[in-house]
Amino acid sequence: MPSKTIKTTTAAAVLALGLLASQPANAADTSDSPAGQKFTFGVIGDTPYGDAEIAKFPSHIQDISADSALKFVTHLGDIKNGSSVCSDEYFAKIRSEFDTFEHPLVYTPGDNEWVDCHRTNNGAYNPLERLAKLREVFFDQPGKTLGTNMPVKTQENLGLPEDVRFTQNRVAFSVVNVQGSNNSLLPWSGLGETAPTPEQLAEVAHRTDAVVDQIHSTFTDARRRNDRAVVLMTQADMFDPSQLAAATADPESVSGFREIVAAIVEETNRFDRPVYLINGDSHVFAENQPLAAGSPWLGIYGQPAADDLERITVDGAANATDYLRFTVAGNSADDRAVLSWEKVPFSE
């Protein structure tokens, strides 16, 4: 089991390790920490939600940027709540604020900013048009992060510049576009649809295939490099405890995740080293092993156990009063406890 520390320290309490130089061997790889030293990264998601949090968001970015030890930051999607308009103006506003991050920022879109935009109170947009706009606004330089530049390998050639992967100090990171709303299979009811449209199904199939391919490629490269751990990041909570009863009664309610979960199980068991899945979506911090022996999710997804998978859900929405700071142990540490994490509260 990985070491876990949940505490309410401030960013100023962290020893300043400094940002580590990036000297990529290729678009996928960045340099290791000097002499295999430990490093930290930050994760947020499902923020800002509503006017009050939108007003605080610049301050939250400043708090994260003040944590000079962070190697990079990831935003797990949902840059707005599910009942506000998905406008070009709002996207541009968030992009301008993302640009103020003083660390490299990896962002993966959430369902609130495209999948759910068919809703009348979201503007009754075609979700695929909104996804295209997100890619135009936030992924205009594929292979480069937002904030401070850090090279990453992308799936731009497949039309998914938001799917990225990179390595740091023998840990493989893979950030993929997996969505709530059953991975975008729910009908676009705001547009009068009662079943998924052909174009909707085509998008889901293409994106899912790309995600599965990236998961397999991430683990293949991790085994080749003898990496110590793999870290997967998504917006969707594929093991949302609030949906367990519904998924048990009707496994098809999570059918959009089935191929992705199967790939994670297969590769986790082949890798036989720690695998961490960090997600947003369900808004309440959690840490567990959703595919350990005896888990009800195994029956729902029809999969064998994957005991080496540790899942961490970040706080979001009204709970987004902190960010998660992850520490990656140095190379000399116990390889069964590569990551540890702690909550760091925002100053306001």
Image (cartoon, grey):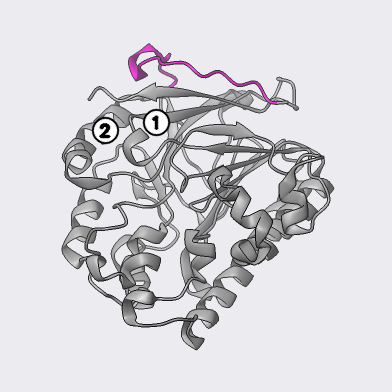
Decide which of 43, 83 is in the foreground and name it: 83
Q: Which residues are magenta?
A: 2-17
* Residue 315 place in picture, x, y as percent: 42, 35
* Residue 335 place in picture, x, y as percent: 75, 27
Name the residue type under label 1: Tyr
Which badge, 2 or 1, comes first in the chain's sequence? Answer: 2
Extreme residue toward the bottom, this view? 198
* Residue 120 place in picture, x, y as percent: 25, 71
Decide which of 41, 314 is in the foreground and name it: 314
* The C terminus sits in image quarter: top left
> Which residue is found at the position 30% from the left and 31% from the top?
65
Q: Is residue 150 in the magenta section?
A: no
Whether residue 220 is visible, yes or no, is no
For disc 2, the neighbor class at 10 Å (few under 14, some 14 to 19, many from 20) is: many
Quarter of the image where one finds residue 250:
bottom right
> Which residue is found at the position 28% from the left and 44% from the top?
48
Please say if the residues under marks 2 and 1 sit with CB atoms less than 8 Å apart: yes
**Can you tell which mark lies on residue 323?**
1
* Residue 197 place in picture, x, y as percent: 47, 85
Whether residue 151 is visible, yes or no, is yes
Badge 2 marks a residue whose secondary structure is: helix
For disc 1, the neighbor class at 10 Å (few under 14, some 14 to 19, many from 20) is: many
**Residue indicated by mark 2:** 60
Name the residue type under label 2: His
Report the Cα–Cα distance between label 2 and label 1. Answer: 9 Å
Badge 1 marks a residue whose secondary structure is: strand
Relative to residue 199, is residue 311 depicted above or below?
above
Quarter of the image where one finds residue 134:
bottom left
* The N terminus sits in image quarter: top right
Decide which of 221, 256 is in the foreground and name it: 256
Q: In the drawing, does residue 95 fall left or right of residue 11?
A: left
> Which residue is found at the position 45% from the left and 59% from the top?
143
